[in-house]
Image (spheres, helix red, strand yellow):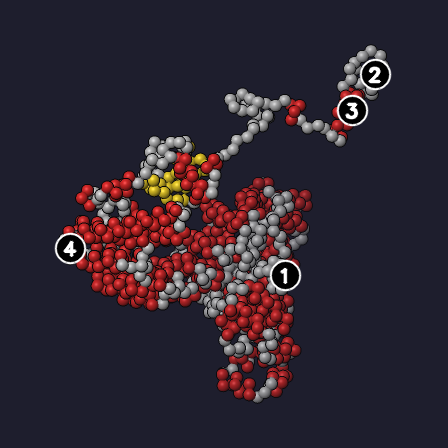
């Protein structure tokens, strides 16, 4: 496969970001990751610090990515150690006032403007501009733009307006305040990192500032804008690039301009400049070199080494590059061929490889060391090698060595090409590899998920981590992908999992509860209980009112023996509930905790009774109180149980709920009651409620079958039942009162002395579920016909009787048949579907006319349209000149087939 034949869907140009009129708005980053920490060096643990299986090749780049660029920056700084002069221009005079003691700084500030200080003689124009910018008041409309993002930190357009404003005003202090607050929320916006660096180049100080500064994820949100506006320390373009590369170590679009900046500011007289640049290039390819779109970085590295004449280093770079699946993989092989053909082997090969090839070729050709040197002094060759005396043999050996070099690299290339072909389809499906606040298309989201699944199954740890980091740039706002990343890392590194959760929760998803809860659970599994407490506490402060978070905090304290703290959290939730329903919910939780965990029946009863006084229309409170009392000795708790029933029956609950409690009271007195008089009176009260329900139904039949208020109450009743708490005492499973709708209210007892003839009709009634456009519940006796049900459906939903078909288990029912003869029993479901009208069968069907009842096949002439235009003239021509009848005599036309 050649990339020239199958180009990827997205191009390599950098998306423009940060401009007010740019489109799309919010384009921010090439693939990468971001780090956290208190200094420019993030203090979060990295992957290499955790005990893991044997580290294979490429493990260093995984470490760099997991550390958020920490290792990359450390290696870069180590390359600068021991230099006699700094890499960039050092304006030491500018940093002295900033490093004075506070008292000395105050003394300096009281002396007047910078023009009266000693800096006047040594500072340059750029420093004067910066000093005046730092001391000048903030721009007039700065507060107006900052208030927008303070009120709504998630307004990305508000942030872009703010950044564009400070860029136009050329005020470095205001720009630093705005950019730092912006990157605390959106660290993946590489375009804005470049804008920030450009502003530092124009208005700030280009030197490296060593003072700590907020990192992405630290002090998240626009709260920094509200702090006292102290002039920040001069950061400089260098420091901005370092922070950006810590946030996005995979971003080639930041590494390339950063290295270009180092070249521009390097001191030509510094002998260590070349070493520093090479160290920076190595850090870049270590962090971003395995990215599929990292070709530009590799080519810059190769071109730089070529300019210096380090051909052996170029070959070593190609050896690494040809084994990495990248977009321009075949182009790199072609350039390597040119590199081999244009240079002598002794120049572009390392000493070890050159000696090894000479020995192999000598053994293959049979000549030894007796041959004289060729082409110059022997000192020009690597030590321990010999040249050939014959020029023809020399040319042959050089070509043989080139052939051997290309042969070995070709094998590596073939394996790499196979890996590229397996990933090419996924790469073509990536249309938006950068960060954007808008939602990702579903097709692209699925492509990322499938790509990740493929890489997890077939790739190495390094490639999987790189792909996850690329994915999370484009999908930084999707918590399911952060969770997928953390779950994958659980098998490889504990610190890696923690770092993934940290980045997700502290920077990108500060208000997503699921990933926070998983992080807290992970920390609790690792024994970091205090860390888990802090995570849940911070989440509840960020998103108040989430029941799942408060319950997770309660259960965390319960698991670790802090029962009083657990109860206190529930009491606080009851007191600060947004409404009565929420307080009732937490009251039930607190009652269960007090009874089941703390073994205090009195406290649990008190909580529920207090909740009932505040919310008398909640059936769940009465049910939980009833179950609480049932959990005790029934004989000793008879008075409390009956009191609970009386509270429910005298409450303003809906009629259906009161019927339920009345039915239960009857059953309780029948099974456990000690007074027959109370049983009889309770039954009579229950019959009164049934009559009230029957009268309500009859009134509804005169109008609509089921009035809207009753529908609403039924739905609420079903909803409350579905969310009912389980039985609080397992040994009373026979009385699962959460499902009280199964009881037949109309026939609570089977004793004839308590029934009369008028009540026998209730026993023969049954309930049917009618599933049409809506679901309805009908009470029938079984004597009704299917036609009667259709008439009823017409009254309910307006569907004509002739257009209805009633189905029982997929079988249509005849109109004149009674429900009893159709086999309909209690709780059966009838489906109402529309009648499908038939039509004529098309005449071109193969079996048309052969099946009984089908329309016969029509003649060909009847369904063929008449030809018009050129087709008609062609027919006329054929009839006149081509399809002529052979006759004697002269031909009838030029095309006669006679």
Mark 2 and mark 3: span between their CA atoms? 15 Å
Note whether 108 is above or below 786 in the view shown: below
Q: Please give the residue where the numbered disc 2 appears in the rendered image.
A: 891
Mark 3 element type? helix
Mark 4 element type? loop
Q: Please give the residue where the numbered disc 4 appears in the rendered image.
A: 635
Q: Which mark is residue 877?
A: 3
* Front label number (2 vs 4): 4
Q: Please give the residue where the numbered disc 1 appears in the rendered image.
A: 22
Q: Sequence order check: which comes first, mark 1 or mark 3?
A: 1
Outermost residue toward the top in this view: 888
Q: Nearer the viewer, residue 37 or 480?
A: 480
Q: Quadrant of the N terminus?
A: top right
Q: Sequence order check: which comes first, mark 1 or mark 2?
A: 1
Percent from the top left, x then y, of residue 371? 62, 46
Q: Nearer the viewer, residue 884 or 552?
A: 884
Label 2 with label 4: CB-CB less than 8 Å: no
Residue at the spot x=55%, y=80% of the render? Answer: 96
Mark 2 element type? loop
Q: Sequence order check: which comes first, mark 2 or mark 3?
A: 3
């Amino acid at each position: 496969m050649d990339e020239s034949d199958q180009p990827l869907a997205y191009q390599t140009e950098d998306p423009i970001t940060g401009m007010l009129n740019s489109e799309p708005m919010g384009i921010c980053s090439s693939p990468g990751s971001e780090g956290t920490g208190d200094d420019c060096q993030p203090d979060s643990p990295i992957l290499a610090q955790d005990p893991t299986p044997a580290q294979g090749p490429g493990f260093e780049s995984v470490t760099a990515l997991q550390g958020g660029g920490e290792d990359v920056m450390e290696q870069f700084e180590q390359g600068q150690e021991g230099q006699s002069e700094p890499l960039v221009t050092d304006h030491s005079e500018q940093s002295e006032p900033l490093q004075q003691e506070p008292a000395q700084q105050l003394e300096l500030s009281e002396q007047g403007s910078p023009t009266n200080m000693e800096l006047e003689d040594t500072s340059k124009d750029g420093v004067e501009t910066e000093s005046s910018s730092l001391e000048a008041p903030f721009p007039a409309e700065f507060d107006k733009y900052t208030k927008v993002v303070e009120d709504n930190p998630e307004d990305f357009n508000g942030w872009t307006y703010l950044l564009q404003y400070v860029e136009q005003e050329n005020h470095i202090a205001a720009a630093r305040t705005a950019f730092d607050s912006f990157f605390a929320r959106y660290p993946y916006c590489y375009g804005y990192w470049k804008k920030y660096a450009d502003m530092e180049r124009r208005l700030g100080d280009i030197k490296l500032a060593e003072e700590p500064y907020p990192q992405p994820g630290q002090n998240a949100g626009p709260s920094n804008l509200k702090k006292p506006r102290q002039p920040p320390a001069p950061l400089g373009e260098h420091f901005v690039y370092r922070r950006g590369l810590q946030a996005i170590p995979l971003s080639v679009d930041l590494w390339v301009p950063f290295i270009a900046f180092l070249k521009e500011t390097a001191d030509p007289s510094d002998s260590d400049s070349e070493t520093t640049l090479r160290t920076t290039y190595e850090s870049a390819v270590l962090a971003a070199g395995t990215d599929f779109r990292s070709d530009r970085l590799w080519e810059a590295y190769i071109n730089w080494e070529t300019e210096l004449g380090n051909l052996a280093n170029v070959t070593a770079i190609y050896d690494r590059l040809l084994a990495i699946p990248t977009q321009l993989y075949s182009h790199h092989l072609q350039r390597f061929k040119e590199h081999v053909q244009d240079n002598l082997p002794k120049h572009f090969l390392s000493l070890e490889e050159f000696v090894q090839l000479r020995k192999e070729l000598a053994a293959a050709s049979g000549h030894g060391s007796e041959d004289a040197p060729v082409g110059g002094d022997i000192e020009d060759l690597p030590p321990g090698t010999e040249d050939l005396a014959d020029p023809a043999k020399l040319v042959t050996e050089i070509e043989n060595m080139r052939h051997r070099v290309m042969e070995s690299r070709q094998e590596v290339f073939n394996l790499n090409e196979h890996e590229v072909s397996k990933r090419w389809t996924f790469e073509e499906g990536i249309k938006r590899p950068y960060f954007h606040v808008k939602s990702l298309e579903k097709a692209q989201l699925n492509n990322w998920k499938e790509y990740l699944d493929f890489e997890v199954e077939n790739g190495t740890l390094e490639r999987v981590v790189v792909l996850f980091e690329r994915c999370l740039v484009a999908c930084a706002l999707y918590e399911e992908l952060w969770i997928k990343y953390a779950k994958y890392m659980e098998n490889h590194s504990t610190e890696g999992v923690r770092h993934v959760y940290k980045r997700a929760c502290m920077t990108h998803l500060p208000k997503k509860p699921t990933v926070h809860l998983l992080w807290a659970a992970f920390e609790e599994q690792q024994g970091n209980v205090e860390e888990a407490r802090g995570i849940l506490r911070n989440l509840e402060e960020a998103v108040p009112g989430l029941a799942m978070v408060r319950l997770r905090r309660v259960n965390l304290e319960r698991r670790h023996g802090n029962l009083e703290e657990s109860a206190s959290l529930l009491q606080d939730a009851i007191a600060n509930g947004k409404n009565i329903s929420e307080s009732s919910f937490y009251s039930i939780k607190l009652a269960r905790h007090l009874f089941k965990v703390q073994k205090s029946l009195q406290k649990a009863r008190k909580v529920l009774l207090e909740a009932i006084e505040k919310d008398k229309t909640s059936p769940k409170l009465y049910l939980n109180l009833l179950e609480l009392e049932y959990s005790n000795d029934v004989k000793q708790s008879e008075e409390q149980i009956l009191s609970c029933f009386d509270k429910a029956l005298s409450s303003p609950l809906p009629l259906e709920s009161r019927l339920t409690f009345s039915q239960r009271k009857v059953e309780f007195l029948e099974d456990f009651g000690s007074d027959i008089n109370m049983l009889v009176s309770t039954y009579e009260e229950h019959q009164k409620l049934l009559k009230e329900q029957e009268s309500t139904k009859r009134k509804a039949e005169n109008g609509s079958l089921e009035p809207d208020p009753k529908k609403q109450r039924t739905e609420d009743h079903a909803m409350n039942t579905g969310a009912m708490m389980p039985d609080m005492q397992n040994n009373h499973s026979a009385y699962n009162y959460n499902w009280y709708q199964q009881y037949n209210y109309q026939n609570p007892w089977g004793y004839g002395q308590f029934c009369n003839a008028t009540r026998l009709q209730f026993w023969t009634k049954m309930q049917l579920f009618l599933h049409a456009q809506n679901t309805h519940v009908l009470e029938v006796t079984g004597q009704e016909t299917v036609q009667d049900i259709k008439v009823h459906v017409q009254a309910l939903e307006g569907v004509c009787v002739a257009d209805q078909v009633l189905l029982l288990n997929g079988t249509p029912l005849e109109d004149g048949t009674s429900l009893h003869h159709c086999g309909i029993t209690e709780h059966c479901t009838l489906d109402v579907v529309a009648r499908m009208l038939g039509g004529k069968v098309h005449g071109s069907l193969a079996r048309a006319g052969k099946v009984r009842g089908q329309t016969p096949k029509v003649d060909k002439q009847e369904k063929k349209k008449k030809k018009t235009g050129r087709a008609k003239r062609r027919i006329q021509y054929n009839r006149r000149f081509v399809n002529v009848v052979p006759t004697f005599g002269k031909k009838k036309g030029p095309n006669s087939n006679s």
